[in-house]
Amino acid sequence: MSTGIRPDDSTSNPCGACVQGKLRECPHIRPIKKGTYPLECIHADIAGPFPEVGVDGSRYWVCFIDDFTQMSWVYPVKERSEFEECFHHLLQQFERPERRCHFLHLDRGGENRSHSLTRLCRDRGIKLSYTGTEQHEQNGLAEVLNRIILEKLTPTLLKSGLALRRWPYFLKAVNRIRNLCPTASISTTPYQAWYGDVPDLSHLRILGSRGWALLPSSKRKKMQSKSIPCQLLGYQGSTNYILLDERGRVFVSNNVVFSENIKNVEPTLDNLTHQMSDQRPSQRRRVVGEEDSYVENAIVLEPSPLPITSREANRSRETGRGETTPDEPPVGDTGWDPDQESTRSSIHVATDEREVSSEETEGHAESRLPERSTRGQLPSRYILASTNFAFLATVAEQLYLVSRDIDQSEPRTLREATQGVHRKLWWGGLKDEHGSLVENGVWTLVTLPPGRKALRGKWVFKLKRGENGQVLRYKARFVVRGFEQREGIDFNETFASVVKPMSYKMIFAIAAALDLELEQMDVKTAFLYGLVNEEIYVQQPEGFDDGSGRVCKLLRALYGLKQAPRVWYETLSTFLETLGFKPLLSDMGVFVKGHTFIAVYVDDLLIAGPSKDEIVAVKQALCNKFKMTDLGPCKYYLGMSVRRDRVTRSIFLSQTTYLEKVLRDFGMDQCAPNATPVSTSKFGEPGPDYKAADKLKEWYAKAIGSLMYLMLGTRPDIAFAVSLCSRHLANPTNEHQTAVKRIFRYLKGSQNLELVYQGELQPLLGYTDSDWAGDLETRRSTSGYVFNLGTGAISWSSKRQRTVALSSCEAEYMGQTAAAKEAVWLRGLLQELERIQGGSRTKDNCDFRGQPRSDRNVEESAVPYKNQAH
């Protein structure tokens, strides 16, 4: 072929340039040896996060697959950090003296390299094996398992017509079916390879199939239906099915007849609201009150805790999983309750995660898994070819948005909380609150003295949400009906100090410009730290009355007492002063020490400082004094989502989640957007005999209140529209209602707008303007102003003036007066903060030319003031 050069195949001295230009991936050699018996070698991976949060709050799933038998297990989880708990559960369930795990193969995710997981494996003699960096192919067994499950889960869930949030049920069912199907690598089913038994498939039905479940005999009546319609969610044990009834409750039964030929509702946008809100807005409260009480109990009830102490974490875990929670006392009977029949019939609600866990149902005790499946599954390429995934993505997003808050309602009474939605979670909150009251010595039980009256109390339930609307905590609080207190007997002085909206917006603006650290903390049962001086008696909390007839003599303040905010503020401010913080004269809700700020809104603390160390020191001092919840970097503050970009020194405030909820509550989530919030036409006044219906007045007041909260938070663009509509609260007409709906339509088209604080700080800049005699009914003028600090607005207002202006000049003066008073206060706040140079400078812009000439010198004006009319 050629001569002159001897071929040299030696690679001892490779050429650097050749290596850089020609290097290819090396063959993927099996990282660990193949297992020789069940459980010897386990491969694991985590899939997610998924946009649809499961009914139990899950956003991920953890999968394990046995190398020898290909048997797999899946666990829906809320956070990746729960991996260790899932692995420990797997070992406890299947490890035996003759069958132990020796190898665990993982990728290099942070949760897989924790010290606790390393310690667990070391104590059990398990060798940890990791893939190379970004070498997912080295964990191919678990990666392929995730792909297979997802390809089966997605079309099954979409075809069922059920809400996407129920994917944890289908996940376990799909994995169970996968274990019962032959696998090419072992030429048999994983189930048979694991247990040695041939599975019976006669029990299987199409997931999502509709059917009828037999009612318990105690609930059946003569000449009435003996069954209730239901839909299949999954399997439990060898004979039972996990079912969903028409009221959204999950129960377990083996007396079911399925009709697999009935077509399920297809997930189209036309029936989206019908499917998720139970057809009519009037029925939405029923769905909210009953839908997911049994759903969440069937899987994992506990949302991820926000740990400060290990004791709290242990208590919340025990309460959430129902392992140490005693039976809740019944409050009332609302008809057939599957829980009450759990010991008397074959139908019962699943109340523990272990009851419906596919891992447990696949235990050796169920050597027979009856399933019937003569249908071939559609290959994934057929689904890909026949599905409009853009449409499905839209449907998924809409389903998620519609279902997220419908299922997460705040009960108004103890009965609703303990018999309706998420009752175990609410009971956990109730017991935490009552335990905290007892532990802190809030009261002592005494006999009510003659001539004294015990105040009544009530339970208030609150969902603590995260930045995306997800539920972080189910919080119950016992409050006193303070309106029953009598001045001079039950209280003397009252005072409630909370940080003003302008103050915390100014802190956000300063933090963005100076790149300050922003952290958040929450004081647990804050009011309990203050001592009361008056003799106050309160009835024992509902649900925790010992039946002795005694009452609670308060030693510490409780929520609802008129003096409670004052007592708590004095306690907190006194402690902060010992740390060197001083309250501002312009806003007593803001404390300053050097360059560190603390904004106090009752028990919510926003901490801003130049360094992490200073904030950590403050946090530690607070934790030493009070029981605190560390919420970490500020992401969700007073109902507002806080988004930050440290690179561009920007902070974005929005209320998108709240706005979506308001639109759904008022049935405007599917409305057509509008470009402006106000019509140019004026309101027509009703006749002298017109009186608005009570239902319209109630709707109108709720709508204005919802819009007012949004306007005060992050939406100055609707200030005038809300102010205009709020003038008719006493007697609204259909025309006024249409005007409010126009605001909703405007918000629908602009729901993603944000307040942006960005760049270097500049002097306080204000704008003000007024109309003249714009209100046709009273002929009073409307004035407004807005003040910016940097790029973002921190204060704004639109208000009808109190008196009639005789001229446009006078109207402008009145408007400038209101703006000047606000400017003086804001300038004082800036001077107290001492954070920026030139903080005392305020520039006020007005478009009226008559006013500056009058300001210079009235005597120099050639035109008398009375002629400066317009």
Image (spheres, rainbow, N blue to C red):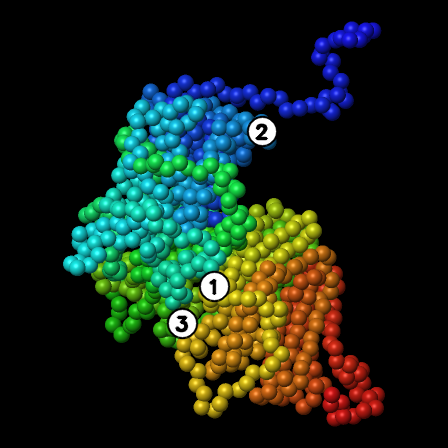
Q: Is residue 193 visible?
A: yes
402 w.r.t. 187: above or below:
below
Residue at horizontal 46 percent and vertical 72 percent from the top: 702
Neighbor class of circle 3 (other Cα within 10 Å; few <14, some 14-19, many 20+) is: some
Residue at horizontal 79 percent and vertical 88 percent from the top: 858
The disc labelled 2 sits on which kind of residue? Gln
Q: Position of residue 539 (x, y in %)?
A: 30, 65
Q: Position of residue 638 (x, y in %)?
A: 53, 60
The disc labelled 3 sits on which kind of residue? Phe
The disc labelled 1 sits on which kind of residue? Arg
Q: CA distance from mark 1 to mark 3?
A: 41 Å
Neighbor class of circle 2 (other Cα within 10 Å; few <14, some 14-19, many 20+) is: few
367 w.r.t. 827: above or below:
above
Q: CA distance from mark 2 to mark 3?
A: 68 Å
Q: Is residue 278 left or right of residue 395?
A: left
Q: Nearer the viewer, mark 1 or mark 3?
A: 1
Answer yes or no: do the residues labelled 1 and 3 have beta carbons within 8 Å? no
Q: Is residue 376 left or right of residue 600?
A: left
Between discs 1 and 2, the one toward the N terminus: 2
* Residue that mark 3 sits on: 491
* Residue that mark 1 sits on: 664
Answer yes or no: do the residues labelled 2 and 3 have beta carbons within 8 Å? no
Residue at horizontal 56 percent and vertical 30 percent from the top: 136
* Residue that mark 2 sits on: 135
Q: Nearer the viewer, mark 2 or mark 3?
A: 2
